Amino acid sequence: MHDTNTAKGAGRPRSAEKDAAILRAALELLASHGYTRMSLSQVAAAAQVSKSTIHLRWKTKADLVTAALEAMRMTEAPPATGDTRTDLVAILRDFAGTVERVRGMALIGTCLAEEAHTPELLALLRERTVLPRRALLRQVLEQARARGEIREDADLEAAVSALLGPFYADYMAGRGGRREWAEQTVDLILAGLHASGG
């Protein structure tokens, strides 16, 4: 006889505010503690909810963390402009900003190191953040190909990997954090994909 906000239900989360608080707390703890040292109890305390409230929404820590990353993805990127270079640079800058805000390189390392023991962490990260980001880049390249800006026979999956790769390579080489990396990467890849004039 109670409304859906107070009735015990089997199903959807009852409060968007609680969801947002939990996701925000998870991201803050991920950034400050790292994946292995953060716990669902810490998230519950920071979000001022019970641990069971978290478990109603997300099954595991991996589920929660990757859902939080998914919710954050592309939140600060400007809308698409239709200009290939501008849109690719915006996607790459948002990607770099996201990784830096949540200590993402450490999370990626954890995902790889824990793959044998916690395979769902890498699988969920791939499904919720890696593949959607790749799809955004591919969509911009497909539109550019349709406009005749890049070669018809261009391997777009290889191009997407080539767009993202320099971020990781620079980080490993101690060159991370260069603001101009996105522009330089896009210019290099577009030069290689450019449709040759007749």
Image (cartoon, grey):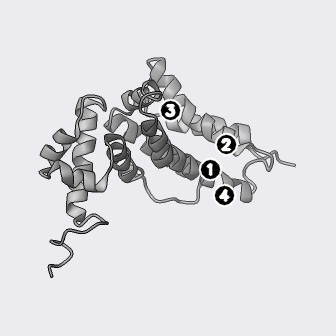
Amino acid identity at mark 3: Trp
Residue 116 percent location from the top left of the image: 47, 27
Please give the residue where the numbered disc 1 appears in the rendered image: 138
> Which disc number belongs to residue 181?
3
Q: Amino acid at mark 1?
A: Arg
Left or right: 183 in relation to 6: right
The number of callouts visible is 4
Badge nearest the viewer, 4 or 3: 4
Separation (CA) of disc 2 from disc 1:
7 Å
- Compared across the picture, whether 185 is left or right of 30 comes to right
- Describe the element under mark 4 as helix, strand or loop: helix
Residue assigned mark 2: 157
Assign a secondary structure to mark 1.
helix
Residue 60 appears anywhere in the view: yes
Q: Position of residue 91 (x, y in %)?
A: 49, 47
Please name whichever residue, 134 or 60, is drawn nearer the observer in this view of the structure. 60
* Residue 10 location, quadrant: bottom left
Which amino acid, by three-letter code, is at mark 2?
Glu
